Image (cartoon, rainbow, N blue to C red):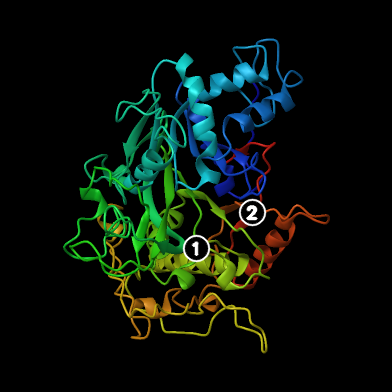
Amino acid sequence: MSQIPLNTKTDAKAAKKPAFHVIVLGPTGGPREDSVTGILVRSTATNWAPESVVAVDAGTLLAGIIRLLERYMPDCTNDEGVMTSGPFQGLELPNKTPQANGAHVFRELIGNVLITHPHLDHIAGLAINTPILEAGNGPKSVAALPSVLSAIKNHMFNDIIWPNLSDEDGGAGLLTYQRLVEGGNPRFGRGDSRGYVRACTGLLTKCLSVSHGRCKQRYHPESGTHHRIGSTVFAEHQLMLPSRAISVDHTDGSFYSPARSPRLFPSTNKEPVMATVESSAFFLRDHRTGDEIIVFGDVEPDSVAQEGHNKLVWEAAAPKIANGKLRAIFIECSYNDSIDDKYLYGHMCPRHLVAELSVLATKVMNVRNGNFGEKKRKRDSIFPVEAGSEQVSPRSKRTQSTSGDRLEPRSHPADYFEIPQIPKVGGPDFGDGGDHADVLESPDPESWVDTKPLPLEGLKVYIIHIKEHLTDGPPPGEQILKELKEHGERVHLGCEFFIPSPVEGIWI
């Protein structure tokens, strides 16, 4: 068996052996259906044992696995049938063809499928691939926040769009749903592992919800409501139960959070209301080393969402970076900086992503300095608007709803992550000077420009979900990567940016 390669950096941190092996099957956000989001992750300590791989999203899954095996078989297989190079390096192949070996990986090695949100480019492969599990030994676990599974259950595996292949409601039993507790379940684990649950052999996971933009939530004539009053995750009323207390489906399968405070009785307003689309950020923890990575689903900047969900992820991540345990972040950056905020549709671009990472850097510096609760003074945006430009900076505030309704704060995950106590996000009355009036907290890169190491030094940031334009010319990722590096250097983050290639394995 070939030796697992080490990271190429020469400093002491990079000398650590890789804890994670990541294969990005689908690095794009469309429009091609064969390369949309799908990521495989395993602990390098497991040596490709049964159920030692977790899939994060499944827009592309089996097709991506077979495509890679076709590329590297048989040239990269030794006499013992072990892959000697390529993204599946070290994998012992029990069959002769890429198709049969791809089915083996899906049936036997993938122990769980984590779904960030139920958009088609993140679940299509799961639907199409599931029938081959009939030749396996039991159901495949699909894990997600309750509202995400509710949407999948009611709108995909429902005997209309696709057969009910789950083990619920009289289905075929090829899939089993695992409803995750947002922020982690404090009944599981101890110490640094508190709240984490098994993702697969060798890996643990904990999930936080994030915003993927807003959409209209239409009136349902049969139920007399706008699909669902309240969210299984973004509980916006003190009398509504938060997600960690909910383990049942909502019959309509919505995964939206109404933009107004929910009432306790069905709405009689038949006009559409704006709702927040839920997505997820998965913390994946190597059971042997305690090292972690984060894999985001589709996500929008806090400065556009004005809800502060990413801020909670950064608060959970900062201590892990400060103590050298968080090795990498996989996060989308769908467009380059030429896009206006109003056309982001719940996605990121370089100026916003670097602004978000600057918030993370600020929190890392606070952890290092033991300053967890000090309110930073306001400063001008690190990405100012040029004169005469219609470009909206990361700190620009989206037009408020004309309804005058206000969001209420959702529960804070600090109770489930063992991190220093940081004040909760306040109610987003966007003009009151509270926390949400300055969501990005005006990062102050001058305060760490001479710091060694820089706040995010050693952190690798992998860019996924790039929207392809399918035209002649350079791929869109080149411009996105260029802008990210320029912004990152200007604000002295210290992290490295990469666009992963599906034909290469990533060792972290």
Crowding at dot 2, Cα within 10 Å, few <14 / some 14-19 / many 20+, comes out as many
Residue 485 at x, y percent in the picture = 67, 63
Is residue 422 shown left or right of residue 457?
left
Asked whether 240 or 402 is in front, the reply is 402
In the picture of the structure, the residue carrying the numbered disc 1 is: 300
Crowding at dot 1, Cα within 10 Å, few <14 / some 14-19 / many 20+, comes out as many
Asked whether 273 or 378 is in front, the reply is 273
Residue 432 at x, y percent in the picture = 33, 86
Q: Amino acid at mark 2?
A: Ile
Is residue 384 shown left or right of residue 196?
right
Query: Which quarter shows the N terminus?
Result: top right
Q: Identify which residue is drawn at 55% across, 78% down.
A: 446
Is residue 361 shown left or right of residue 422?
right
Q: Is residue 341 above or below residue 283?
A: below
Residue 109 visible to the viewer: no
Q: Secondary structure at mark 1?
A: loop
Residue 437 visible to the viewer: yes
Q: Secondary structure at mark 2?
A: loop
Q: Earlier in the sequence, mark 2 or mark 1?
A: 1
Is residue 391 shown left or right of residue 130?
right
